[in-house]
Image (spheres, rainbow, N blue to C red):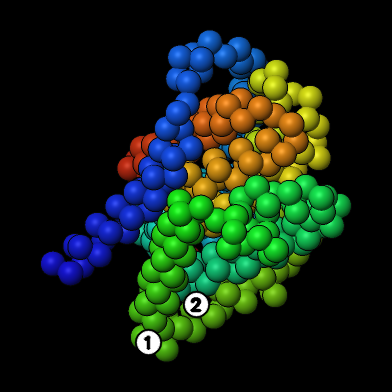
């Protein structure tokens, strides 16, 4: 009974947070005006392949990281596991990383502990890259970020005065959910480490990047992942007359801010991402209603792409034969 309630809360709380923020943002939105918005779909269709390549590069990098451990899963299985992980995270945020390791274990006989360790390593690399280009972006756009903190009520000089009751409620809820997700992660790691064998596999996966035979390829895949993410987002700017003139700098700042917003565990960052990116667009001169329209349309369409790739993965995995694992090195 307790497990059922806990699993239910893992779905309901992030969804409630996303719905609450979106309701607050769009409670007075002109939905009729939205239907009359002119949109150049050619740019949106052009952006979609980069949504695919971001996930495909992630599969290539993951497979490369597993190679030094003697794990040689099929690329198709790795790719479908990644697609499926994004889909599952729409239902239970952050669940995809564990589930994609389970997919490899089931269909390829890959060590679950080693797969999890390699995923953790990937995340460390990703966060390091985000931190690096975020620091450069902040230094190059200090006035914009100062204004962003002021607009969101997070400036150090006016933190208490700038926060509205809604701001306090949203921040408290986000913090609470973040702590709960952290507790869940720690418990999972404790489960992984109950036996020496599993802990050994986990550590081997965590340190697999040190044994890469082609580290330059790992770096290349990592760059490909984030370049694809950015282009997937940036090309959407050209779909609308009110964003097509902003340029790459504004898109990059919005992209960086959005990367941190999605750390809040909601389905595909829904809610926090909308609020953060909309605020950045307003700071660059986009009218507030237009900015809200942009984030709503772009996020919705990109989420539908994740759903489409995830459903394709589910169908493909259903037809995939389980493979007897090769002898480990």
Residue pictured at 84% horizontal, 57% vertical: 139
Q: Is residue 38 visible?
A: yes
Q: Is residue 305 visible?
A: no
Residue pictured at 62% horizontal, 62% vertical: 159
Element under label 1?
loop
Q: Residue furthest bottom?
A: 196
Q: Residue furthest left?
A: 1
Residue 264 position in % (x across, y down): 50, 56
Return the residue at label 2: 202
Q: Is residue 310 above or below residue 17?
A: above
Residue pictured at 32% horizontal, 59% vertical: 10
| Inter-mark Cα distance, 2 to 1 | 11 Å
Element under label 2?
helix
For the residue pair 83 and 156, the one nearer the viewer reads as 156
Residue 70 position in % (x across, y down): 56, 70
**Where the N terminus falls, by quadrant?**
bottom left
Return the residue at label 1: 195
Left or right: 143 as drawn, with respect to 51: right
For the residue pair 260 and 146, the one nearer the viewer reads as 146
For the residue pair 243 and 248, the one nearer the viewer reads as 243
For the residue pair 1 and 210, the one nearer the viewer reads as 1
Label 2 Cα crowd, 10 Å radius (few <14 / some 14-19 / many 20+):
many
Say which label, 2 or 1, has the lower sequence index: 1
Residue 21 position in % (x across, y down): 44, 44
**Where the C terminus falls, by quadrant?**
bottom right
Dividing the picture into quadrants, the one containing residue 108 is bottom left
Q: Is residue 188 above or below residue 11?
A: below
Residue 314 position in % (x across, y down): 37, 41
Label 1 Cα crowd, 10 Å radius (few <14 / some 14-19 / many 20+):
few
């Amino acid at each position: 009974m307790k497990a059922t309630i806990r699993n239910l809360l893992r779905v309901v709380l992030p969804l409630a947070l996303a719905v609450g923020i979106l309701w607050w943002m769009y409670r007075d939105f002109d939905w009729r005006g939205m239907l009359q918005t002119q949109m150049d779909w050619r740019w949106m269709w052009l952006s979609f392949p980069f949504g695919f390549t971001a996930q495909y590069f992630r599969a290539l990098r993951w497979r490369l990281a597993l190679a030094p451990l003697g794990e040689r899963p099929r690329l198709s299985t790795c790719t479908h596991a990644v697609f499926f992980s994004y889909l599952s995270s729409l239902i239970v945020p952050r669940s995809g990383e564990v589930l994609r390791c389970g997919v490899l274990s089931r269909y390829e006989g890959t060590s679950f502990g080693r797969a999890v360790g390699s995923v953790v390593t990937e995340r460390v690399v990703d966060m390091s890259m985000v931190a690096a280009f975020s620091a450069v972006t902040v230094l190059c756009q200090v006035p914009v970020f100062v204004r962003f903190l002021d607009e969101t009520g997070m400036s150090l000089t006016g933190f208490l005065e700038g926060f509205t009751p809604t701001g306090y409620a949203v921040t408290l809820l986000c913090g609470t959910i973040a702590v709960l997700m952290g507790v869940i992660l720690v418990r999972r790691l404790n489960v992984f480490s109950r036996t020496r064998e599993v802990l050994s596999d986990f550590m081997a996966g965590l340190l697999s990047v040190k044994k890469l035979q082609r580290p330059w390829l790992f770096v290349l895949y990592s760059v490909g992942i984030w370049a694809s993410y950015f282009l997937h987002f940036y090309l959407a700017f050209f779909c609308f007359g009110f964003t097509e003139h902003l340029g790459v700098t504004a898109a990059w700042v919005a992209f960086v801010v959005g990367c941190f917003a999605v750390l809040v565990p909601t389905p595909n960052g829904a809610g926090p991402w909308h609020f953060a990116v909309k605020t950045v667009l307003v700071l660059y001169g986009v009218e507030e209603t237009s900015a809200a329209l942009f984030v709503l349309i772009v996020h919705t369409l990109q989420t539908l792409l994740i759903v489409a790739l995830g459903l394709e993965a589910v169908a493909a995995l259903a037809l995939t034969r389980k493979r007897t694992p090769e002898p480990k090195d």
